Image (cartoon, coloured by chain):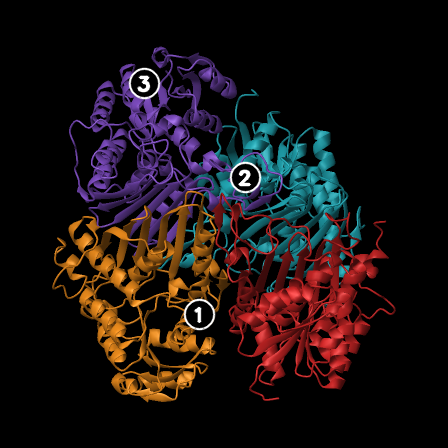
Chain colours: A orange, B purple, C cyan, D red
Amino acid sequence: MSGKARVKVGIIGSQFAADIHAEAFRLMPDEAEVVAVASPTPGHAEKLAKKYDIPRVFTDYKQMLAEDDIEMVTIAAPNFLHARMTIDAANAGKHVVCEKPLCITLEEADLMIETCKRKGVLLMYAEELFVAPKYVRAKEMAEQGAFGKVYMVKQCEKHFGPHAPWFWDVEQSGGGVFMDMGCHGIAFCYWFLNRPKIKNVYCQMDTYVHGGRTKGEDNSICILEFANGAVGIIEDGWARRGGMDDRIEVYGEGGVTYANLLMGNALPTYSEYGYGYAVEKAPTTKGWTYPVFEELWNYGFPQEMHHFARCVRGREEPQATGEDGRVVQEILYAGYQSAGTGRKIELPFRPEGVKTPIELWLNKNSRA
Amino acid sequence: MSGKARVKVGIIGSQFAADIHAEAFRLMPDEAEVVAVASPTPGHAEKLAKKYDIPRVFTDYKQMLAEDDIEMVTIAAPNFLHARMTIDAANAGKHVVCEKPLCITLEEADLMIETCKRKGVLLMYAEELFVAPKYVRAKEMAEQGAFGKVYMVKQCEKHFGPHAPWFWDVEQSGGGVFMDMGCHGIAFCYWFLNRPKIKNVYCQMDTYVHGGRTKGEDNSICILEFANGAVGIIEDGWARRGGMDDRIEVYGEGGVTYANLLMGNALPTYSEYGYGYAVEKAPTTKGWTYPVFEELWNYGFPQEMHHFARCVRGREEPQATGEDGRVVQEILYAGYQSAGTGRKIELPFRPEGVKTPIELWLNKNSRA
Amino acid sequence: MSGKARVKVGIIGSQFAADIHAEAFRLMPDEAEVVAVASPTPGHAEKLAKKYDIPRVFTDYKQMLAEDDIEMVTIAAPNFLHARMTIDAANAGKHVVCEKPLCITLEEADLMIETCKRKGVLLMYAEELFVAPKYVRAKEMAEQGAFGKVYMVKQCEKHFGPHAPWFWDVEQSGGGVFMDMGCHGIAFCYWFLNRPKIKNVYCQMDTYVHGGRTKGEDNSICILEFANGAVGIIEDGWARRGGMDDRIEVYGEGGVTYANLLMGNALPTYSEYGYGYAVEKAPTTKGWTYPVFEELWNYGFPQEMHHFARCVRGREEPQATGEDGRVVQEILYAGYQSAGTGRKIELPFRPEGVKTPIELWLNKNSRA
Amino acid sequence: MSGKARVKVGIIGSQFAADIHAEAFRLMPDEAEVVAVASPTPGHAEKLAKKYDIPRVFTDYKQMLAEDDIEMVTIAAPNFLHARMTIDAANAGKHVVCEKPLCITLEEADLMIETCKRKGVLLMYAEELFVAPKYVRAKEMAEQGAFGKVYMVKQCEKHFGPHAPWFWDVEQSGGGVFMDMGCHGIAFCYWFLNRPKIKNVYCQMDTYVHGGRTKGEDNSICILEFANGAVGIIEDGWARRGGMDDRIEVYGEGGVTYANLLMGNALPTYSEYGYGYAVEKAPTTKGWTYPVFEELWNYGFPQEMHHFARCVRGREEPQATGEDGRVVQEILYAGYQSAGTGRKIELPFRPEGVKTPIELWLNKNSRA
């Protein structure tokens, strides 16, 4: 295959995240093209294929993996399927872009990394905050010395509940909002501080609003202490009204910066009549709203997929790998253990025989 | 003494907090007047007296307490003197307004409360956040049902170091930034949620920037779990550049609000030449700055002193009492214990023979 | 009457502005007390009296003027009554606080000023922007040299229509939004720049939204050129949705500042359920809103009435006088003339036999 | 030439705007490539060529126009050269992208349009606000009915002086800040309202700060009345400190929106030490600053050049043409005439024998 041709991509999935993948490739078309989509529910893959003009459609992703010309697959399926799909793709010789979180268990994470390595394919971890332009700008300033030594980094992501019903089921998701969105914050702090060793984790979480439909936590606070002396604070919520909120704060001995990805970039708007769309999870477009502009670009999704395609071509090194996802996974485990015991958990932490991270909280939790 | 005359007030102290007291009484003059000030350092009391036209000046506060007509004293002295001064004032039959934190040890707190009760004087706790107009507004909305059930309250206060050198000395202050400013956030969450029982406390703290001049922590994060099912998050910093930052966030199942006391109320301003004053701890008035307006009024200081004078006259009930201060003190102890052990501390918590709260962190801390 | 007693005040009016007056006196009670209220509509004065505990009630304001102990009256009646009431009050020996705009015609303005002078009473002009704390802060910075020479000042005030139906009737109001709110901006620029001579006026206005119920303009832009070389820009609207908007911008060769009285001071809030009150003219309290706090205080109303009472006692000099109101009135005339002719109008400008300022626009306007 | 190959581009100029052009093409490389640059000053073209890896370099742009493979040239030269260069390029059969303003005189504008039409090449007008993502978003909402009928649109652009010394010389620039940046606001309002006929223009301008080095105005306010009943307000300044300011406001009978391109998208940042770059014209990176992120993308420059390349390939119709630039040019003339006479100028307006628009203000201005 010529090094100059665009990377041929197959998407596994057809819903929220799959749509973002397809749109991301459409927005930056020069390095990759989506040639196939696979989704088991009849009609779903067709719908996405039609919307984005994708030529090939499959209900069985394994059939898609059999297509010779596909070089890279992106996995946009429920968490509990990530490991199996990644391993199947690797065995078929495809490079893998896996959505966050990497998987459910640490055993899965290890197997995914090992299999991809053995098969000589890239395992790329879809953490878009590493390329979100506003957050990248904060990191650039940090690296230019704007803040001196950075001692605290915060990230929060909050809205009023997940994109798809399977998130409510902890068997499919592995956990609640800490699993769903905490993984972003953990990765963010780790990346922002240039991947120092993480010493320990403390977590506080509870189910404040959505107890009627999930055993998972809908609000979490997580504190990471890093070996370089810095601290990370990660706040996540499925219980915050008013549309998506995604922010960071960076504190150094010599300065501070704040970046607000959505409301902070928005056009404060009042409308008596409403309009098309404000922002992810916004409840309405009437009254005062904070419509975002170029939402995907501001999150960094097109840039991310562009980057991954270039990695497949050997032009760039992956910024987010299976190893990064594995670090996040370990913190997720330790976080639930901390929330369950009320103690700071020292790392490394590797519990045996735990099927889902959230068990560590649910089982020890005295709320029962 | 006529119930109609203005309450005669004596101030103990002459520096930062004493100046605020004097100015607060000046701004709302109809219920109280400052007639005396006491400060041991020669010249200090005179200076304040001259600035605010205060007739009587003392170097020994005990002499001031002997003045018959003084009905209320305000204590604006280092933390370790609060208990002694309060007890002396109570024994002299004066009502007491004590600056935050109430004292150093729980034993002191108990003795202060008991003595004032026995002597029939009010022990009023100077927590101005209970009357800060913007925060009061948030509480009003909460009580009008704007947010439904409130499940999380956050308060933070951050700047680049304390007002006076004695804060750096943990023997005089009892602790670092958690002691100095965490007491505000603890009181705020407790008050905002209408004083539910506090179940437990977790704290993370460290000395990131000012290790050269203090053993005290200069950054802290504190998590309170309340018996009503809500959580409080309190962040404090002496390591944040750029001038004072004081904010709250309130999360309910039905809504959210944000209040920013300083930058959020300020006039975004660029000046090539500078001007008089921007905000507490602002490093400069050149370039972009966020000057506040009517700073004391926006903090609620005049309203607070006005309220306390009315309490002395029996027209209002104190909104902040020694008991409130005692609750805060217990949390401070438990917070340092938590930071020292890496565990959530269940309340009630009453360690024996601990001279300063910070010992609980310093002694067990493995940082040595 | 003793110079120490509180100034006794009578309010003429019982609606929006009268309520603000009464509440303003209640908030700062040490210099004045409201002892009477007069309103011709049966029951109206009683209602206000009951709300604010005002002892005396009149349907005929002239009867109220006959009360010997009343020293100061405040006029909160439709514009076309201002002159007559002021003159009656002056003839009764009462000091007068007149709401904005001062009156309808320049002849009235001259007569009001002259009568008050002749009778030895103060004619005080109720322009609260001169005491609005945030705007006062901007002026302080300007005077401290923050901006160097100030070359441009802007003020805007916008909402979705007036407080009372009589504003729609240009016979009673004398004009539309430029008359109703432009008077604030004119006064503001004039005051901020320390009352330089005004050279000329240009105005653009139209009726964009409310043409169905008024002949008056509902949007206006006004440009003032001052003899000191600065320019003032005044924007007003009765056609802006989303609640009251009141802002200033100050530009100097050495800096710039922005002050936003309402949204800029507010608590950004999302509520699913709503709450009591957000801000003047806010259409709802559900969804995202910008609730203000201590609205009257932030406008400066209590401070203003406090100041006027002190002027009556001779302790302060009026900051806003009939002469200021007369300057504003002249600009209103010139502004309508400019809008009608499409030309910059040089001052002084004194048209003869013009009953209401807006005629100058309506009559010459080619829109018919 | 194959319709599939990338459009080959030559840039005329090597300074501020030329650098933006080169960077814009680099950021979106799939439709065009810069193959040549021409600049008369020895070494200048080489420098840009080196920075952006541009293979061919010329000191005489006419030699560059002789290159057969170049299909499109972009003109980033002083205003007074636009017409001559455009006509030369058209005569050489090249499509033209001309920087704003289109030229100096209306005669030039007519000749440019006519020549390009005759030679069958596109005359594309580089008004990036038509593609600035945040402003595009505002227009989308307007078109979705968010604001009902839009009656007022405002745009302002302000900083502390132009990019290059030649702007100070009105012979080369044709005018001051109204010419330099007012052209953006005029185009913006016209485009936002879907190009209604413009009825008349009023302008106020003066030289407040930079009188020592230019005869041109450094502050201007412009009011456009449109045939559809809407009004446009355009404010520009070379006299505003603190870094570039670029904002719009859109008012409809049913709503309002605000978009702030720079500070509104920025990361509020405090730095004791400084960092690389904050924003165009920012005086410093120390203290509080508002660093932008992905500045060119947020302005829309890469999208604009991408669009123009697609126009050359016939895949899109130009959004901004010579005719648009000609409309702007007429307004510039009328604006200076208005400022010179203090009158609203009715359109069409075509003065004879006027060499530069600013003459109309300078000659009639009584400031002398």
Give the quarter of the image for residue B196.
top left
Q: Position of residue B201 (x, y in %)?
A: 22, 43
Marks 1 and 2 sit apart, C-alpha to C-alpha, by 47 Å
Q: Nearer the viewer, residue D210 or A170?
A: D210
The residue drawn where x is 72% and y is 36% is C113
Q: Chain of mark 2?
A: C
Q: Chain of mark 1?
A: A
Whether tag 1 and tag 3 are in contact, CB under 8 A, the answer is: no
Q: Chain of mark 3?
A: B
Q: Which amino acid type corresponds to the residue marked 2 in the rendered image?
A: Pro
Q: Secondary structure at mark 2?
A: helix
The residue drawn where x is 80% and y is 46% is C348
Looking at the picture, does residue B308 appear above or below residue D169? above
Q: Are marks 1 and 3 on the same chain?
A: no
Q: Position of residue D329 (x, y in %)?
A: 75, 69
Q: Position of residue B11 (x, y in %)?
A: 40, 20
Q: Are marks 1 and 2 on the same chain?
A: no
| In the image: residue D299, left or right of residue D11 | left
Q: Which residue is mark 1?
A: A303
Residue D127 in sight in this render:
yes
Q: Secondary structure at mark 3?
A: loop
Marks 3 and 2 sit apart, C-alpha to C-alpha, by 36 Å
Q: Within 10 Å of the Cα at label 3, are there few (<14), some (14-19), or many (20+) other Cα atoms?
A: many
Q: From the viewer's perspective, is the residue at label 1 or at label 2 nearer?
A: 1
Whether tag 1 and tag 2 are in contact, CB under 8 A, the answer is: no
Q: Within 10 Å of the Cα at label 2, are there few (<14), some (14-19), or many (20+) other Cα atoms?
A: some
Q: Position of residue D126 (x, y in %)?
A: 65, 71
| In the image: residue A240, left or right of residue D366 | left
Q: Secondary structure at mark 1?
A: helix
Q: Which residue is mark 3?
A: B94
